[in-house]
Image (cartoon, rainbow, N blue to C red):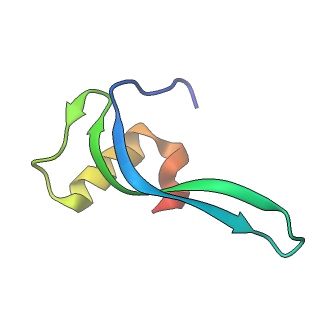
Amino acid sequence: MDRFLGDTILDGEMVVDVKDDRTSVSKFLVTDALIVDGKNLMERKLDIRLGVSSLNCPWLMGAF
């Protein structure tokens, strides 16, 4: 990741993933991207919003 995004609002859920070895990892599962890097996406369809967020946040790809 080259930089953090500013002016970004994502909707989702915080979950705890418990692995087979009983270790746990906290994750934020993104279900919607409302504003990404200052761009208001709320008038666009959900699939377009998530596509924009994956382009701007490639580290989110596993969350969809």
Q: Quadrant of residue 53?
A: top left
Q: Is residue 52 left or right of residue 1?
A: left
Q: Is residue 54 left or right of residue 16?
A: left
Query: Looking at the image, which residue sits at the far right?
Result: 21
Query: Looking at the image, which residue sits at the far left?
Result: 43
Q: Quadrant of residue 22?
A: bottom right
Residue 58 in the image: above or below residue 31: above
Q: Is residue 16 left or right of residue 47?
A: right
Q: Residue at x 55, y 45 (%)?
A: 59
Residue 31 in the image: above or below residue 53: below
Q: Quadrant of the N terminus?
A: top right
Q: Is residue 13 left or right of residue 50?
A: right
- Residue 61, percent from left and from top: 50, 54
- Residue 60, percent from left and from top: 50, 49
Residue 20 in the image: above or below residue 45: below
Nearer the observer, 39 or 26: 26
Q: Residue at x 22, y 54 (%)?
A: 48
Q: Residue at x 25, y 51 (%)?
A: 49
Nearer the observer, 18 or 51: 18
- Residue 5, percent from left and from top: 43, 27
Q: Quadrant of the C terminus?
A: bottom left
Q: Residue at x 75, y 69 (%)?
A: 18
The number of callouts visible is 0
